Amino acid sequence: MTETIVVLTEEPLNSADLRNLELLASEGTMFNVLIPEDTKRNLVLDFLDNLSLLDVAAAFRELLHGQPSADEAKTEAEEAKRLSIEALAGSRLAGTVEIVGDDAVSALVDHVRRHPVDRAVVITTPHAVEDTFHTDWANRAQDKLGIPVLHLYSGSGYIGDS
């Protein structure tokens, strides 16, 4: 029986993410990867997240840059899609990659309601404020879906608290 796992990611899939997904996969597992066009970022939270990671330069650079334009967000999402497709193709995993609107959690919930999905996985970078107060994508999706959502930190084997 084929299992389907939907993956919502804010970053292109990388080798560590693929290793983590391989641990979840059985023979015939199909992955549906969703990448949001992130046009409505919370700049204050992004600033605090970067500071919590001691990345002061990135914190101020992103704060001064402001919200990405629709074109910038689309370009970033298309590049993340291209890289994720390449990563999947170079692995033993089968799946599709699609760009969704900028409300990532709603896109995940809509996808799960429209398609038969066995599990949901959210891959993000650490977000100190959201993770601490359980307002991250994984917690919000779990609340809306009513099913467990695995939260992985991109590029690592660390599991978020959802």
Image (spheres, rainbow, N blue to C red):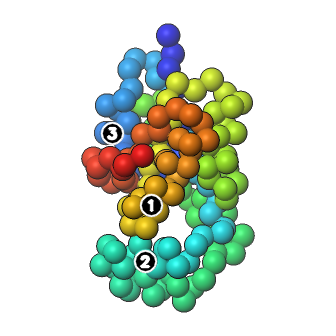
The residue most toward the left is: 157
Q: Residue 104: x and y, percent?
A: 62, 52
Compared to 127, does 94 lie above or below? above
Of the numbered discs 1 and 2, the one sitting upstream in the chain is 2
Q: Which of the two residues, 68 or 135, is positioned nearer the viewer here?
A: 135
Of the numbered discs 1 and 3, the one sitting upstream in the chain is 3
Q: Is residue 84 visible?
A: no
**Residue count near mark 2 (Cα–Cα under 10 Å), binned few <14, some 14–19, many ≥20:** some
41 vs 13, left or right, is right
**Residue count near mark 3 (Cα–Cα under 10 Å), binned few <14, some 14–19, many ≥20:** some
| Residue type at numbered disc 1 | Phe
| Circles 3, 2 touching at the beta carbon (< 8 Å) | no
157 vs 79, left or right, is left
Q: Residue 122: x and y, percent?
A: 47, 46
The residue most toward the front is: 133
Compared to 122, does 111 lie above or below? above
| Residue type at numbered disc 2 | Leu
Instruction: State how far apart marks 1 and 3 are (Cα).
Output: 25 Å
Q: Secondary structure at mark 1?
A: loop
| Circles 1, 3 touching at the beta carbon (< 8 Å) | no
Residue position marked by numbered label 1 in the rendering:
133
Q: Residue 28: x and y, percent?
A: 46, 18
Q: Residue 158: x and y, percent?
A: 29, 49
Instruction: State how far apart marks 1 and 2 are (Cα).
Output: 13 Å
Residue position marked by numbered label 3 in the rendering:
20
| Residue type at numbered disc 3 | Asn
Residue position marked by numbered label 2 in the rendering:
48
Q: Residue at x 66, y 37 (%)?
A: 111
Q: Residue at x 41, y 72 (%)?
A: 49
